[in-house]
Amino acid sequence: MSPETPSSNGTPRPARFVRPPPPALGADCALFLDIDGTLAEFARVPDAVHIDTEITDALRRLFDDLGGALALITGRAITSADRLFPNLKLPIAGQHGCERRDADGGIHLHSPVKTTQARLRNLLRGLATRHPQLLFEDKGASLALHYRETPQLAAHVHRTLRESLGADEGYELQPGKMLLEVRPEGRDKGTAISDFMAEPPFAGRLPVFVGDDLTDEHGFTAVERLDGWTVKVGPGPTAARFRLADPTAVKHWLQVPMVAEATYAMDPEDEG
């Protein structure tokens, strides 16, 4: 039961639950990590994101210690993510699971409906042309409009795309931090993690997923279903069990020495 604190009128009320940081990773874990907002701070444009060398060193060590059961789960295209880790080729799901490189280096692609994709590409590119503060990002299977430089256009972007997307066209909208994406239906970070968990070296391990955005909630749901650990980076409501304040806190947690077996004893309640 939650501890109680006095309210303004003196009657007891439940204290707000604060999610704790995650325990140390165990050698029996399978680790899944988002990139932007999790391993690195956001930048004005995606190509300006920088990965701390201490993060790269920690990932290389963890990849070895976990027997290769470490994967990146990102909205970026795989080619974009690989440029951030030039000397580290990890298993990865890109574009929210629309493309995936497994532990053996095999590539799995989920092709979009090309005619619909072409129409949506023209729509998003046209919006960015009319409003130069918007950044159009063509990832391949998925498309995104970033409005970080002009948040006052957020409502216009959301309304335009919502009204332009038919219910039976095989695509759906995915809100993110200061952006809106259009991606093929049926693929998200949760399905990507589930795909990895059905394959070696991930199968049979305790899944752990760390992410910061709305897009990561799909991953949290999938990992909770597998009785794994879920870690939200930064503020905001979430389905995750644990919380880390920012990418710096993630870096420090990744540097904590690994234990033989992952354990925790908690049953967190909603923060409200």
Image: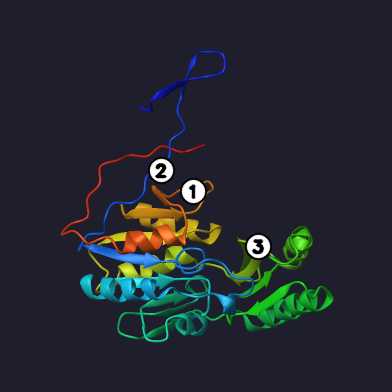
Disc 3 packing (10 Å; few <14; some 14–19; many ≥20): few
Q: What residue sits right under mark 1 in the picture?
A: 238
Using the image, tell me which numbered label, if any, was put on residue 19: 2
- Per the model, the C-alpha gap separating discs 3 and 2 is 25 Å
Horizontal arrangement in the rendering, residue 90 relative to residue 61 (left or right): right
Kindly identify which residue carries mark 3. Answer: 178
**Total marks placed:** 3
* Image location (x, y in percent) of residue 240: 42, 50
**In the rendered image, the vertical position of residue 11 relative to residue 100, given as above or below:** above
- Under mark 2, the amino acid is Arg
| Helix, strand or loop at mark 2 | loop
| Inter-mark Cα distance, 1 to 3 | 18 Å
- Label 2 environment density (alpha carbons within 10 Å; few <14, some 14–19, many ≥20): some
N-terminal of the pair, mark 3 or mark 2, is 2
**Secondary structure category for the residue under label 1:** loop
Q: Nearer the viewer, residue 146 or 252?
A: 252
